[in-house]
Image: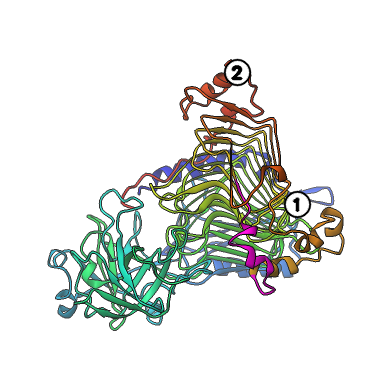
């Protein structure tokens, strides 16, 4: 993928933001006198120009100087500016309270005006000789194209590929190899093909054995010789099509097409499960693949044409801010960490803005225990797991954390941890995600946990394709996680392959107390799904070719009933964790403390009011859900030829001609002003 459009978008956005109130300070004011910021400059890696005052060879030295200035009482805003070019680091840059500015004079880490400053956690690889013993194991077609490289000594003790990925993993540490266009992939079988889709690049399980550790392959045509593989991995949708797990192979019986795993997947292996082999030397058979030899420390790779210069991710994290205050990170391109790009823990008023965050194996940005701050006006793409995680506030007291993600473009997140990962994860109390464009990934748009969050004014499209029993906007398994609002969003093109089903908004496993209003759903398979919950409000939404507009079940009376009754269940644990009998919980939710003794499995008091459906069924009730337990009023169904889903102006005319005035403005629901999509290179 060419990064030229991204550079242009970043520079344009930076220019817009710098001229806006968001970048409104130019000097600190102290005692009535304006104080110009102190600017420290950092040379790119490899720069050998003469050093000057306030110009440093690398970021750690610049921040050491910042700390010294603060100890001496320097109160001005301090700007640490990375000059144009690439700045390499092998360990995180640490920012703490000893670097802190003030609200009027913050500490700013920024890049050059043209958006060309890159902070990267990768290092170039040194070419090496390809040992004959490894060359002989390559497919014949690859022997003239594969090259060998020496990996850094620091990676010798690391796993060749990654740690196992199971149900609860949130942010993997993964070895990744890069060329100028992005990440290569470990050699796999089957190959995804020239036009990868949800069903390409997979084979299936013929039969599994008791215990969930061993299985045989159904179709082994083209299966490479696995007899000499010592670090072979498999990934698959072993039991459910909402969970992809990556596990290490313990033994291979090539003749019987039988593989045995080190540990069983979650809930075992079903016959017919999709799976593939990963990190097999015998499968290194096309450009863009690599394999690592744990014995010699060599990397074997088949580079793309003209892209033989490769790099490997080395830094676990690029920036680590612990207890920092009044910090701005702006106009930077941050790339290529083995884990998360930026981790912020504790502190206050910390914002990442007008930046590009890409190619992390883990997450792009993590804010935990922070008061005020977040991500704005940025581009986030090609992230391994969830992209942005925000955790703030205090659930026991329902104190809001004031964290946000605004006006940011997300694409191709969840590329390594493809399931149970999201563009945005909100936890704690009172976070906001607004004005974002979230598209073209296999993960969720947002995972809502905790209380009183807002998901507002976002465009969500082309997600979770190839999965089943999941949703683009997801929450669940905590009856106390109430008060969040999903409003004024444009959700479209959310469908999966035949035989599977996905949702637009999925209130899973008793999720309750949500408000879903003034959203536009176009071509969404199941736009709003309430999985057993109560006290949800669905009002003034418009559903176009999205059917049924609302689906509701009472799973608490059927298959989920044991979770409501068993004292040690996840559901009960979440319920017990909140002080429901104490203020402010008792005042906000006066009946919640007694909910488990008052028919807890009944889905009730869901208000489905004043919605418009066009070419869609109205309501589907299953699993003992009863319409009489809900409030269902004033919903309008319009039949006839459905307007072109891409023509939002036509939608308003369509309803007006039938005497219906929409309570939303479709023409304003696209997020066209954000940075251009990087989702342009089919090879990735």
Residue 275 in percent (x, y) is at: 34, 64
The residue segment tinted magenta is: 552-569
| Mark 2 or mark 1: whose residue is earlier in sequence | 1
Is 302 on the left or on the right of 313, as rendered?
left
Which residue is under mark 2? Answer: 656
For the residue pair 501 and 391, the one nearer the viewer reads as 501
Specify the farthest residue to the top.
657
For label 1, the residue is: 104
Residue at image coords 56%, 19%: 653
Give residue 366's position: percent from left, percent from top. Answer: 59, 62
Does the magenta run of residues contain 83? no
Residue at 49% of width from left, 64% of height from top? 362
Compared with 288, 520 (above or below) is above
Tag count in the figure? 2
Locate residue 87 relative to residue 149 in the image: left or right: right
| Tag 1 secondary structure | loop
* Front residue of this view, candidates 84 and 477: 477
Q: Please, is residue 482 above or below residue 152 in the view? A: above
Specify few, some or many for label 1: CA neighbours under 10 Å numbering under 14, 14-19, or 20 or more.
Answer: some
Question: Residue 384 versus residue 178: which sits nearer the camera?
Answer: 384
Q: Nearer the viewer, mark 2 or mark 1?
A: 2
Label of residue 520 in the image: none
Residue 558 shown in magenta: yes
């Amino acid at each position: 993928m060419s990064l030229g459009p991204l550079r242009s978008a970043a520079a344009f956005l930076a220019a817009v933001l710098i001229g806006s109130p968001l970048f409104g300070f130019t000097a600190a004011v102290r005692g009535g006198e304006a104080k110009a910021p102190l600017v420290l400059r950092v040379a790119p890696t490899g720069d050998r120009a003469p050093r000057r005052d306030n110009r440093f060879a690398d970021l750690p030295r610049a921040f050491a100087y910042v700390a010294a200035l603060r100890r001496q009482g320097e109160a001005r805003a301090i700007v640490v500016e990375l000059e144009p070019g690439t700045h390499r680091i092998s360990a995180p840059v640490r920012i703490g309270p000893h670097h802190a500015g003030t609200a009027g004079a913050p500490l700013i880490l920024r890049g050059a005006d043209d958006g060309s400053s890159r902070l990267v956690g990768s290092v170039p690889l040194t070419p090496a000789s390809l040992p004959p013993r490894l060359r002989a194991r390559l497919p014949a077609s690859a022997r003239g194209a594969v090259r060998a490289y020496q990996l850094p000594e620091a990676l010798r003790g690391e796993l060749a590929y990654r740690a196992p990925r199971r149900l609860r993993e949130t942010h993997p540490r993964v070895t990744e190899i890069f060329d100028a266009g992005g990440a290569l992939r470990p050699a796999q079988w089957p190959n995804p093909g020239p036009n990868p889709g949800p069903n390409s690049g997979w084979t299936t399980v013929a039969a599994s054995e008791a215990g969930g550790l061993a299985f045989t392959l159904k179709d082994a045509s083209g299966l490479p010789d696995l007899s000499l593989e010592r670090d072979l991995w498999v990934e698959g949708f072993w039991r459910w099509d909402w969970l992809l797990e990556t596990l290490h192979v313990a033994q291979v019986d090539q003749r019987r097409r039988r593989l045995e795993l080190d540990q069983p997947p979650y809930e075992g292996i079903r016959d017919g499960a999709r799976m593939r082999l990963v990190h097999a030397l015998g499968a290194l058979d096309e450009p863009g693949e690599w394999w690592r030899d744990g014995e010699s420390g060599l990397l074997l790779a088949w580079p793309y044409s003209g892209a033989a210069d490769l790099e490997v991710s080395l830094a676990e994290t690029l920036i680590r801010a612990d207890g920092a205050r009044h910090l701005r990170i702006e106009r930077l391109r941050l790339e290529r960490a083995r884990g998360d790009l930026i981790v912020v823990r504790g502190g206050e008023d910390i914002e990442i803005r007008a930046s590009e965050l890409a190619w992390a194996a883990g997450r792009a940005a993590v804010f935990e225990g922070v008061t005020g701050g977040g991500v704005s006006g940025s581009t986030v793409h090609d992230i391994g797991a969830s992209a942005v995680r925000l955790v703030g506030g205090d659930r026991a007291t329902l104190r809001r954390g004031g964290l946000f993600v605004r006006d940011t473009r997300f694409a191709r997140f969840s590329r390594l941890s493809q399931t149970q990962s999201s563009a945005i994860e909100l936890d704690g109390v009172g976070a906001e995600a607004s004005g974002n464009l979230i598209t073209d990934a296999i993960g969720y748009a947002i995972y809502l946990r905790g209380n009183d969050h807002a998901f507002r004014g976002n465009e969500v499209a082309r997600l979770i394709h190839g999965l089943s029993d999941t949703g683009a906007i997801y929450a669940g398994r905590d009856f106390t996680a109430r008060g969040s609002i999903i409003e004024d969003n444009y959700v479209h093109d959310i469908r999966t392959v035949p035989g599977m089903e996905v949702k637009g908004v999925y209130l899973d496993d008793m999720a309750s107390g949500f408000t879903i209003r003034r959203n536009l759903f176009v071509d969404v398979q199941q736009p709003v799904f309430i999985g057993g919950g109560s006290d949800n409000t669905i009002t003034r939404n418009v559903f176009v070719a999205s059917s049924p507009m609302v689906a509701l079940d009472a799973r608490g009376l059927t298959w989920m009933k044991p979770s409501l009754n068993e004292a040690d269940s996840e559901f009960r644990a979440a319920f017990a964790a909140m002080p429901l009998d104490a203020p402010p919980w008792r005042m906000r939710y006066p009946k919640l403390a007694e909910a488990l003794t008052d028919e807890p499995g009944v889905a009730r008091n869901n208000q489905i009011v004043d919605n418009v459906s066009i070419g869609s069924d109205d309501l589907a009730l299953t699993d003992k859900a009863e319409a009489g337990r809900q409030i269902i009023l004033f919903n309008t169904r319009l039949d006839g030829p459905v307007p072109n889903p891409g023509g939002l102006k036509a939608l308003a005319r369509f309803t007006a001609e039938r005497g219906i005035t929409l309570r939303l403005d479709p023409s304003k629901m696209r997020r066209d002003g954000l940075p251009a999509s990087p989702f342009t290179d089919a090879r990735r």
